[in-house]
């Protein structure tokens, strides 16, 4: 099979690898598409200590079941599935208290074991979620990142009629904007220095967009502020725009060594809640159901590359052009 193999920090190749064979409890998936995201960039850059090379990355994947491992009864061969890549151990303290996304022995498809930037991938059968027939392949490829946004939404108080400010008009920021609007926000404002991203954000029905949050003219602040960038300057600015009694959600992934300045007195005086959201937690099936019920996000997919054009996809991602980039193994690049 053709696959992307990361052989070490900064080194990858598209090559032929042996077809994987599903082990007991696994299914073999013929990959339809797999999204490229920031985690993949960290893997390519050698920035994740949990990664052992060589590795086939890719964790935002959808495909069709083509074989069942020993002892597996479903999903049936031919079923189109989205794959939840997260593999909590089930035995550590956090798994035992129902917080599997904080697992002390966390592993994941495409992060600690071979993933979806390949024509075929073997995954645990329990992670393969059947998809409804009416869901497009583009939408199916967004299930995994949307499930992260659903978990972020679940971390919020979700009081209808509140005003939201979101930093970042990338895929994750726009998914969060769509979700909070769907959940009953009074208004959603999005800030991003990238004018092209703001122009696209405006087409999604977002109430206000601006390259600087000061342009929104809300001196009283916002009930909910969400950072979807991980950028220190954005986080510090956002913390200063939370209305008294409001909530700040750290949703974007920051550099592990980054620090921000925050006034503990302001947090005390204004009763500001500062919360985090990490990966997926009981939110994969709800993401599928949201997409199936009519949450339209297909337009977030701007580029689809053949697997042999993986280097071009990485270049486009790093340049910040387009929106969500998908790799389609075995298919020609789609403009």
Image (cartoon, rainbow, N blue to C red):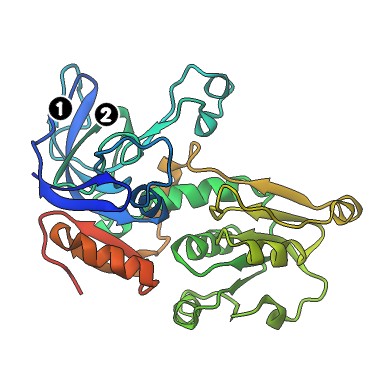
Label 1 sits on residue: 68
Q: Residue at (48%, 48%) from the top-left corner?
A: 148
Considering only vertical position in the picture, is 93 above or below 256?
Answer: above
| Few, some or many residues within 10 Å of mark 2 (<14, 14–19, 20+) | many
Where is residue 104? Give x, y as percent.
51, 26
Q: Residue at (63%, 59%) from the top-left corner?
A: 226
Of the image marks 1 and 2, the number of the one nearer the N terminus:
1
Contact, mark 1 vs mark 2 (Cβ under 8 Å): yes
Query: How far is mark 1 from mark 2, CA to CA?
Result: 8 Å
User: Which image quarter holds the C terminus?
Assistant: bottom left
Where is residue 18? Give x, y as percent.
8, 36
Res. 238 image quadrant: bottom right
- Horizontal relation, residue 36 to residue 217: left or right: left
Considering only vertical position in the picture, is 128 above or below 13?
Answer: above
Where is residue 85? Give x, y as percent.
35, 38
Q: Residue at (68%, 47%) from the top-left corner?
A: 275
| Few, some or many residues within 10 Å of mark 1 (<14, 14–19, 20+) | many
- Horizontal relation, residue 182 to residue 145: left or right: right
Res. 222 image quadrant: bottom right
- State the mark number for residue 125: 2
Q: Residue at (26%, 29%) from the top-left corner?
A: 125
Q: Nearer the viewer, residue 133 or 305?
A: 305
Res. 220 image quadrant: bottom right
Where is residue 169? Give x, y as percent.
51, 70
| Residue 161 visible, this angle | no
Q: Nearer the viewer, residue 161 or 52?
A: 52
- Which structural element holds mark 2? helix
| Residue 155 visible, this angle | yes
- Which structural element holds mark 1? strand
Q: Nearer the viewer, residue 289 or 31?
A: 31
User: Which image quarter holds the N terminus?
Assistant: top left
- Horizontal relation, residue 227 to residue 59: left or right: right
């Amino acid at each position: 099979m053709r696959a992307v193999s990361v052989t070490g920090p900064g080194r990858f190749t598209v090559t032929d690898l042996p077809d994987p064979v599903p082990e007991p409890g696994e299914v073999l998936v013929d990959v339809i598409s797999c999204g490229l995201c920031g985690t993949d960039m960290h893997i390519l850059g050698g920035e994740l200590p949990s990664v052992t090379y060589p590795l086939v990355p890719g964790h935002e994947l959808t495909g069709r079941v083509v074989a069942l491992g020993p002892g597996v009864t479903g999903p049936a061969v031919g079923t189109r599935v989205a794959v939840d890549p997260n593999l909590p151990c089930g035995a550590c303290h956090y798994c035992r208290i129902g917080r599997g996304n904080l697992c002390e022995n966390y592993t994941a498809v495409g992060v600690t074991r071979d993933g979806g930037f390949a024509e075929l991938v073997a995954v645990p059968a329990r992670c393969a979620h059947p998809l409804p027939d009416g869901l497009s392949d583009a939408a199916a490829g967004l299930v995994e990142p949307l499930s992260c946004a659903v978990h972020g939404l679940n971390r919020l108080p979700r009081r209808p009629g509140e005003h939201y400010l979101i930093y970042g008009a990338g895929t994750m920021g726009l998914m969060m904007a769509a979700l909070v609007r769907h959940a009953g926000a009074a208004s959603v404002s999005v800030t991003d220095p990238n004018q092209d991203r703001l122009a696209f954000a405006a087409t999604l029905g977002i109430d206000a967009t601006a390259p600087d949050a000061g342009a929104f003219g809300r001196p009283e602040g916002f009930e909910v502020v969400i950072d979807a960038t991980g950028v220190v300057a954005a986080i510090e600015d956002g913390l200063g725009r939370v209305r008294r009694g409001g909530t700040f959600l750290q949703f974007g992934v920051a550099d592990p060594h980054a620090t921000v300045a925050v006034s503990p007195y302001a947090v005390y005086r204004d009763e500001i809640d500062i919360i985090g959201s990490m990966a997926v937690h009981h939110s994969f099936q709800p993401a599928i159901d949201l997409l199936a019920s009519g949450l339209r996000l297909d337009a977030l997919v701007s580029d689809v590359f053949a697997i042999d054009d993986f280097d071009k996809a990485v270049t486009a991602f790093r340049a910040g052009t387009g929106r969500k980039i998908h790799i389609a193994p075995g298919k020609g690049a789609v403009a």
